[in-house]
Amino acid sequence: MPDKILVTGATGFVGAALCAHLDAQDMSYVGTVRQASTLPSRLEVGELTAQTDWSAALTGCDVVVHLAARVHVMDDQSSDPLAAFRSVNVDATLNLARQAVQSEVRRFIYVSSIKVNGEATHGTPFTSKDQPAPLDPYGVSKMEAERDLQALAQETGLELVIVRPPLVYGPGVRANFQHLMKLLKRGIPLPLGAVHNRRSMVGLDNLVDLLTVCCWHPRAPGEVFLVSDDHDLSITELLRSLSFAMGKMRPSLFSMPVGLLAGAAGLLGKSAAASRLLGSLQVDIAHTRATLDWVPPASVEDGIRKTVAHFLSLADRS
C-alpha cells in the first residue's frame, strides 16, 4: 500500500468522492485545492499552471492521482480553445509530473478521458489498444498529456498509470445527466422512447474503486485502462431506470425516428448534444479486468439509485 497519496482536484466531483473513500479505507492522503476549503487533509496550491509549486503538497507522497484539469465545456467561448486546454491539461500536468519525479514519487495516476479514443463507436467498443482519435480540443489535450507523460516515464522510471473514463455519474452529477433527471422529475414528455443506441458509463463508486486499486496494484504501471460499469444502456433504458428510481413506473416517453431527431437537432445547432443522446459509445474493459483482477463493485442499478436519491434530496430542499 502507498505511504501517502496526493489527490489533485480534491473538491471536484470525482476528487471529493476519492478522498472520502481513502478516508474510509484509512489511507493517508493530501488533497490539493485552488482555494480555501473545508476538506480534511487539504492544501491550497492556487491555479493549476505550468509554474505551480507542488513541493509542499508532494512532501512524503509516493503516489499522485491527478484529477485536476480544464474540463470539457459546452459552447466554449475561448478565442483559442486548444491553447486554453493545453496550458492546463498538458503544460501544467507535465510541471506536476516533473516535480513528482524530483520528489521521488513512485507512481503517477493520470485520469484522462475516453475522448482520447474518439466520440462514438459503431458496433465495436473502444479498447485501450486503439489508435487515439480525439475530435475536439479537450480530447486532443488529454491525448497530448498522455504522450508527454509516457515519454517522461520512459526517461525517468516513473510508474505511469492512465485511466480513461467515459461519462461519470453519481451523487452530485451535473450537466446533461442532471438535466435529464430534472426533465423526468417534471414529467416532461421526451421523444426518446425508441432509441436503441449503446452507451458505456461509469458510476462514481466504481471509478473511485478502480483509482484506489491503481494506487497499489503491481501490474498497473505502464498500462492504459478503460473503465465502465460493464453494463451498457440505451438512452431509453437509462431514462426508464432513472424514472423507476424516482418512484415512477414509467417515464413520459414517446417515439420519434432517430434520423428526424438528429436532423431537428442539427437545425437548432445542437448536433453535438444530439450525438451524445442518440449515438453509441461503448468501451471494452476486458484488459482492465484481467490485468488488475478487478470487477466493478457497484451495479448500474445501485449507482442510479444513489444518484437519484441525492438529486431528489437536493430538490426537496429547494
Image (tube, rainbow, N blue to C red):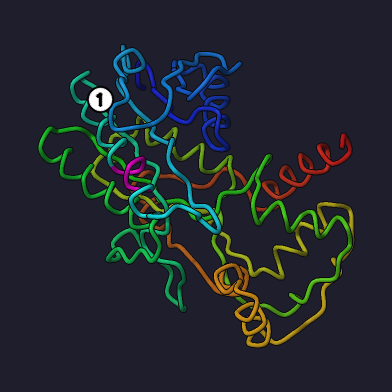
Depth check, front residue: 21 or 265? 265
The local secondary structure at tag 1 comes to helix
Give the position of the N terminus as an image quadrant: top left
Residue at x-position 70% and y-position 87%: 257
Residue named by callout 1: 100
**What is the magenta segment's predominant secondary structure?**
helix
- Amino acid type at mark 1: Ala
User: 72 above or below 58?
Assistant: below
Number of marks drawn: 1
Q: Residues within 10 Å of mark 1 (few under 14, many from 20)?
A: many
Q: Nearer the viewer, residue 292 or 108?
A: 108
Q: Residue at x 51, y 37 (%)?
A: 208
Decide: is 89 above or below 34. below
Measured from the top left, where is residue 170 in percent x and y? 65, 44
- Residue sitting nearer the eye, 280 or 32: 32
Image coordinates for residue 124, horizontal then vertical, percent: 42, 75
Q: Is residue 105 above or below residue 111?
A: above
Q: Give the camera-side residue of 316 and 80.
A: 80
Q: Position of residue 308 (x, y in %)?
A: 77, 47
Q: Residue at x 46, y 78 (%)?
A: 122
Q: Is residue 248 left or right of residue 237?
A: right
Question: Residue 267 appears in which quarter of the rendering?
Answer: bottom right
316 relative to 137 in the view: left or right: right
Q: x, y percentage for residue 110?
A: 35, 40
Give, as a single range, the part of the protein colored magenta: 85-90
Q: Please identify the residue farthest to the left as the structure is shown.
A: 155
The C terminus lies in quadrant: top right
Q: Is residue 155 magenta?
A: no
